[in-house]
Image: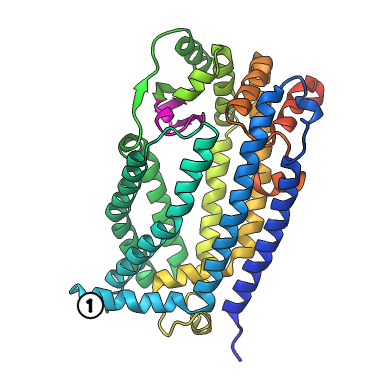
Amino acid sequence: MAFPYMEAVVGFMVLMYIFETYLDVRQHAALKLPTLPNTLKGVISQEKFEKSRAYSLDKSHFRFVHEFVTILMDCAILLCGILPWFWKKSGDFAVLVGLNAENEILHTLAFLAGVMVWSQITDLPFSLYSTFVIEARHGFNKQTLALFFRDMLKGVCLSVIIGPPIVAAIIVIVQKGGPYLAIYLWAFMFVLSIVMMTLYPVLIAPLFNKFTPLPEGTLKEEIEKLALSLKFPLKKLFVVDGSKRSSHSNAYMYGFFKNKRIVLYDTLVQQCKEDEEIVAVIAHELGHWKLNHTVYSFVAVQILTLLQFGGYTLVRNSTDLFRSFGFDTQPVLIGLIIFQHTVIPLQHLVSFGLNLVSRSFEFQADYFAKKLGYASALRSGLVKLQEENLSAMNTDPWYSAYHYSHPPLVERLAALDKSDKKAD
């Protein structure tokens, strides 16, 4: 008797839903606490705390509903045989529009087109409610319905343009990869990631936001001075108009080798009235660069990708695996989808491990900024960002350890307050 792979996958999905819901309940209880953590008393105003609490509870309620609907749909798709049914219907559609359904690439593209339509329809109510109810209720949403749907249309168009060549390439590689399939797939994804990281900020991001050079002034001078002192090859400083969609704030850097760029959200510039606070946040980001965190993370992702493709090559020809999910044939895309489902347990463990590493990197970057003399400014900047973004003030330790890639503010401030000897 063949092993019931599909039933096992559904069973684990349900177990993970129960576990994550338990963590959500713990976090919801923490969010309901009526007082600030001791570390934040006198640091965060009561008014901001109440607003943050209301915002976090609204998002928590929404998460319960969204996750429940998601697990119901995912289980129904697998248990009711919707996946193989949809694959068959996509082949019928391909024939209907005059395409050769025997061509796996064309059949796969028809299948993905249907999946994209389905996902847009099912995700739309949640996206609309999150953006125009929750975010708007708490003063964050700045976009109009027209801008929302224009962004959605742009995303669909980009998927239609970029997706087919990538899908076709993956199918050809799998069909012709032979014993070195895992290496070929990894090499393709490696090159693709480099190309996308190069093209995204230059060609894709400007389709959604406007990037303007940071105006001359003390802020620009201080950032350039900091970059020069660290030998960071800063080429350009941009401000992005994030405020046209949301009042949330952020900053990031990108680029390869000697062509680095830093981008500040206009909301960050508006919210941090003191230039030194923004410079301190940039010092933290440059700490990631100086300490090679970006390189370590990239290498880790590449190793995990190669291992994942290696695992896929071991099961891609398993007839029992495909039949368990209702397939008599073994399409490449379906094989990848099934494999992703079967390694869900490992993915959760890896994600947890990466979060632990990421949190460690955040502490190191904070300490890097502290050593540069920005301890007070970074502390002030982190508090300001926490207040303005209405981030959760009370967090459950289990929930944050499992979900957060960044430590809670309480932990970061405590680390900053330690003496240099203890921080070492």
Whether residue 230 is visible:
no
Displayed quadrant of residue 50: top right
In this rendering, would 380 be left or right of 86? Answer: right
Is the residue 148 above or below the residue 183 in the image? above
Q: Residue at (46%, 68%) from the top-left corner?
A: 336
Which residue is located at x 35 percent, y 65 percent? 112
| Residue occupying image coordinates x 44% and y 82% | 327
Q: Give the residue pinned by disc 1.
A: 95
Q: Which residue lies furthest to the top in this view?
A: 218
x and y percent of residue 282 in the render?
54, 22
Residue 120, percent from left and from top: 39, 57
Q: Does the magenta stretch include residue 43?
A: no
Q: State the residue lying farthest toward the bottom.
A: 1
* Image x and y of residue 349, in percent: 66, 57
Q: Which of 196 and 24 is in front in this view?
A: 24
Residue extent of the magenta highlight: 240-264
Residue 43 is left or right of residue 347, and the answer is right
Q: In which quarter of the image is the C terminus?
A: top right
Q: Which colour scheme is used?
A: rainbow
> Compared with residue 28, is residue 413 higher up or lower down, i.e. above or below?
above
Residue in view at x 54 percent, y 37 percent: 294
- Determine whether 344 is above or below 2 in the image: above
